Amino acid sequence: DSDGGSLEHLRGLHLHREGQRSRRDSPCFQTMLPVFLVVVIVVMTVLILMASAYILVYFQAEEDRNTAWMPKVAVVLGLTLASLVVLLPPLDVANRSSGGELDVSLLYQVMFVSIAILVVVVIPFLIFYYEAEEPENARGQLCRAMVYEAVTLASAATVLVLMWIFLGRAQIPVTHYVYEDQFLDATAPTPAAGCGLGSGCVAGKSNFYEIGVTPVVYIMALSSFVGWFFLALFGGIGMAALPLDLMLAYKSRPQSISLQDYAKQRVMLHERAQRLRSIGQALGLDAAHERNRKARVAYNKYKQAVYFLEQDWAKVRIAYKQRGGNPLRYIAMAILGFVCLVISLIWVAHLILYVLVQPPITPVRALRTTPIARMPRATHTGRCVVGCSPPCLLHSFSTTFS
């Protein structure tokens, strides 16, 4: 009875799997998956747009409210495109697992070209426009920005076209094998060792197969190549700065102070504010638009001192009026700083093990890529001398495995 029950259970499990396979292969299921992916794309795009707008509103300065709308639109678009590019690989995986109905390669091209337009056209034009701010001459401000942008666009286009003409090639590593012998009869037994060096095969020769790329693909490759340097720069800064900032925020958290200490802190902050006010009056109202490098450095130092003054005043108010504030917030910062520190160390270890060390120390990458990277893709070319007999047609045979 137990054996019969086990057989019935296995038969039912087999029928259940067959039913799942038939439903997965049905046209209705294949149609639902692309629709689901399209819905996910639309929903995620809307959510990322909303999150980008919220980040902009949260971090913008008080004097920038309801002004300079175009830079704000550029910031929202930049944050959105940066987030969507990160989400494209999982979308590609989901699309391939569902049959590949969506043209994800087109999405990649649209996304990278949009980023290139934002970097080369939109952002430089906005910088030129607002750096040349002339309230009494709006037309001159626009014309000057358009001239600078035209020069920037022409320079970028010239460099891109020249690089694509002379460097627009992709080299694919391949291993070339040549078989110099007649084929065996299809009914004859094949040796277990396969094709050896003594049976017509020669050792594989490593080579590169060169193909030309389209301008869009070259823009994608160039954007990724340049982006790696910025990722290394800002990623390295973030890996060290974010955990340190969070831990220092916990260490320098406001502590509850008395009324006498609060009065002393106010007097000290008032003196700092008076000194900064004198420095600001000496710099003048047009210090933000100065083209002299020394004047810009002085203005940036002044802005930094004002920022630190505002932060210290906010801490003093929290220390006295809120008795140090909510302690759970600073405990959460300490925990998050520790987690970010661990993630940063893991990231550094990952770069060392998988990028700097070749071959990788751990076999995870090799095991993961074996089914795809080692799958042979063969192209056959037969060569024959004019006037040879039919058996000679297969005497010279070339196969390339990549």
Image (tube, rainbow, N blue to C red):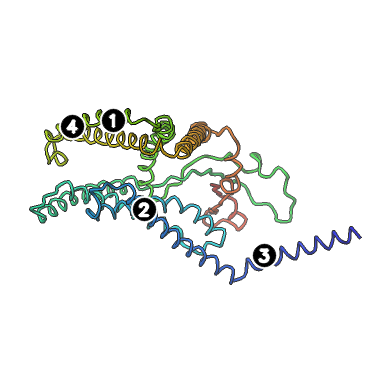
Name which residue lies at 46% across and 43% down: 208
Q: Check disc 1 and report the residue beneath it.
A: 263
Lateral position of residue 241 relative to residue 73, left or right = right
The answer to whether residue 53 is visible is yes
In terms of sequence position, does the residue under pointer 3 or pointer 2 come before the other?
Answer: 3
Q: Secondary structure under badge 2? A: helix
Lateral position of residue 263 relative to residue 382, left or right = left
The answer to whether residue 355 is visible is no
Q: Check disc 3 and report the residue beneath it.
A: 21
319 versus 102 height, above or below: above
Q: CA distance from mark 1 to mark 4?
A: 17 Å
Q: Residues within 10 Å of mark 3 (few under 14, many from 20)?
A: few
Q: Are marks 1 and 4 in contact (CB under 8 Å)?
A: no
Which circle marks residue 192 in the picture?
Answer: none
Q: Check disc 4 and report the residue beneath it.
A: 274
Name which residue lies at 33% across and 34% down: 316
Residue 259, horizontal then vertical, whole percent: 33, 31
Q: Check disc 2 and report the residue beneath it.
A: 54
Name which residue lies at 60% across and 39% down: 364
Name which residue lies at 28% across and 30% down: 263
Q: Are marks 3 and 2 in contact (CB under 8 Å)?
A: no
In terms of sequence position, does the residue under pointer 1 or pointer 4 come before the other?
Answer: 1
Q: How many tags in the picture?
A: 4
Q: Residues within 10 Å of mark 2 (few under 14, many from 20)?
A: few
Q: Secondary structure under badge 1? A: helix
Q: Are marks 1 and 3 in contact (CB under 8 Å)?
A: no
Lateral position of residue 190 relative to residue 328, left or right = right
Q: Residues within 10 Å of mark 4 (few under 14, many from 20)?
A: few
